[in-house]
Amino acid sequence: MTKRRRGIEIVVLALVFATACGGTSPAPAPGPLSVVITNDDGIEAPGILALAEALRPLGQVTVAAPSGNRSGVSHGVTSDRVIAVQKSERGGQKWFAIDAMPATCVRLAVEELLPSKPDLVLSGINKGENLGTVTYYSATVGAAREAAFLGIPAMAVNLASADGMDYGTAASVTAAIVRSLGRSGIARGTFLNVNVPALPPERLRGIRITRQDTRAPIDFFEKAIAPDGSTTYTPRWEHLEPGGEGTDIWAVRQGYVSVSIFGFDQSAAIPPAAFIGLRRLESLSFLF
């Protein structure tokens, strides 16, 4: 590791301890970690290679990722066909190229491909940010959620798109977070969504523990008439401008690494008055 990369890790490590969970981080468990890396950009994506190299000093790294690009499939699973797996070894690490969606790659790795349950699953580094409600469409986030379903600490890691994206910096930031949190720093039933701005390390302002921006994404369709008279619609989208301070979008736009804590219990917290109204549904037994 270069002195520059090591410097990034030292700074980020200090920031994690200072900002996570009210200023107190659990001590990492001793010993090497068993880590599974996946993503949705495909096994040959540069983000996955950078992450595998950055985590090499922390323990045994196994890559179990889609054989091709599976971006935007959310938490989709592959359950309607036989799944092909190609195994190789790269620098002492086992790499599995799996013809399946990212969430299925995680489950197959945990249940069949690994000799034992891993300590951590990392999904990324995704090419492009996953912020706000866009995270519902993200297969990078979906793969991390799948690991959380299985009771395994997990993180989705994303790098904002820009010319000359530096996956090395994002990988070093991720390694520092992993060093800080260890095996016990992610609560059961939750997982982390990490977004790194596309900035050189000296311009990163630190880490912020953020909440998800809940505004709807800006998606639209461009209509065109083809020469044969048929109508076509091309999907388009725009990045949201920063919303409220403390949200994930705000943090990344301000130059901070955003760390959001996601849960997979989708039961909504609602106002007491609304809850009372909904409880009336339980009295509608005449319908059954």
Image: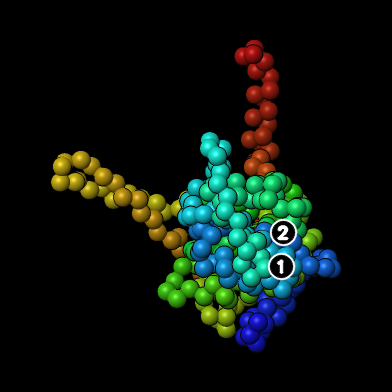
In the picture, the quarter occupied by the C terminus is top right
**Residue at position x 83%, y 68% from top?**
31
**Res 118 seen here:** yes
What residue would you read off at disc 1?
Answer: 178
**Res 250 seen here:** no
Q: Amino acid at mark 2?
A: Leu
Q: Residues within 10 Å of mark 2 (few under 14, many from 20)?
A: many
**Residue at position x 52%, y 54% from top?**
67
Q: Secondary structure at mark 1?
A: helix
Q: Say left or right for 288 vs 254.
A: right
Query: Mark 2 near mark 1, Cβ–Cβ under 8 Å?
Result: yes
Q: Could you say where residue 287 lies in the image, as x and y percent from the top left?
A: 62, 14
Q: Say left or right for 9 vs 244.
A: right
Q: Residues within 10 Å of mark 1 (few under 14, many from 20)?
A: many
Q: Say left or right for 160 vs 279.
A: left
- Return the mark for residue 120: 2
